[in-house]
Amino acid sequence: MNGLTPICFNRRIEQPTKKLSETQWDEWEKNHWKERLYVNADGKLIVPFKALRKSYIEATRFSEMKPPGRMKSWRPMIENCLIVEGDMVIEYDEKKLRGWPDYVKRGNGTVPIIRPVIDLPWSGGFHLRAYDDSLTMKVIDHLSEVVGRVTGWMEARKYAGYGRSEITITEI
């Protein structure tokens, strides 16, 4: 997989329990924004397998390709018969990692946060395993195209267009 747009992360992190002033909050964000990255035990940046799986499930909403038989959507087949085997390690230039200021709703207002973003180029690979004959290479390739170009990966996909990619499927 090769990125077509930057990719944004937003892992949940423990936030201060006491109320901070705006200046204190900004300082806290500047010191902790990299904690929002997903990393594995080796310290490598990853997209968790759950996020990969979720994107394939979401892609079924946008697919025009219909499954054989009486099913109206690929969703049940993807949920039950397509396994993502492990996390995807992201390959990138560390100089391309930056903090992106964003605003999220909290209570009655908005709060500024800094989300980690990796600018282009970035890439990665992962393994899929299909457990039904109807999930052919043609179907998986089609859904991968929808994932890469429409649904995307990780955060800020809908309103900022982050996380788009080109996915190449190879049968093993």
Image (spheres, grey):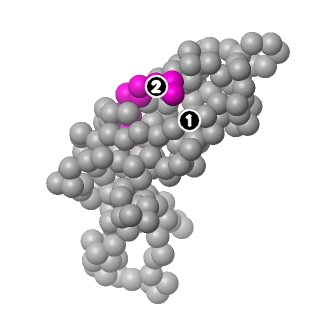
Residue at figure coordinates x 46%, y 25% from the top left: 169
Report the side of 151 relative to 139 (left or right): left
Report the side of 101 relative to 55 (left or right): left
Is 51 located above or below residue 141 in the figure?
below
Which amino acid, mark 1? Leu
Count residues near mark 2 (Cα–Cα under 10 Å), then give few for <14, some for 14-19, many for 20+: some
Measure the C-alpha gap from mark 2 to mark 1.
9 Å
Could you tell me which quadrant the N terminus lies in?
top left
Which amino acid, mark 2? Ile
Residue at figure coordinates x 57%, y 49% from the top left: 50
Q: Does the magenta stretch include residue 168?
A: yes
Q: Position of residue 30 (x, y in %)?
A: 27, 71
Visible in this render: residue 23?
Answer: yes
* Extent of the magenta region: 159-172
Residue closer to the observer: 43 or 77: 43
Give the quarter of the image for residue 100.
bottom left
Is 111 located above or below residue 56 in the figure?
below
SS assignment at label 2: loop
Disc 2, disc 1: CB below 8 Å?
yes
Q: Is residue 102 magenta?
A: no
Q: Position of residue 138 (x, y in %)?
A: 56, 15
Q: Which of marks 2 and 1 is nearer the N terminus?
A: 1
Residue at figure coordinates x 49%, y 65% from the top left: 12
**What residue is disc 1 on?**
128
**What residue is disc 2 on?**
169
Give the quarter of the image for residue 24.
bottom left
Q: Which mark is residue 143?
A: none
Q: Position of residue 125 (x, y in %)?
A: 41, 39
Count residues near mark 1 (Cα–Cα under 10 Å), then give few for <14, some for 14-19, many for 20+: some
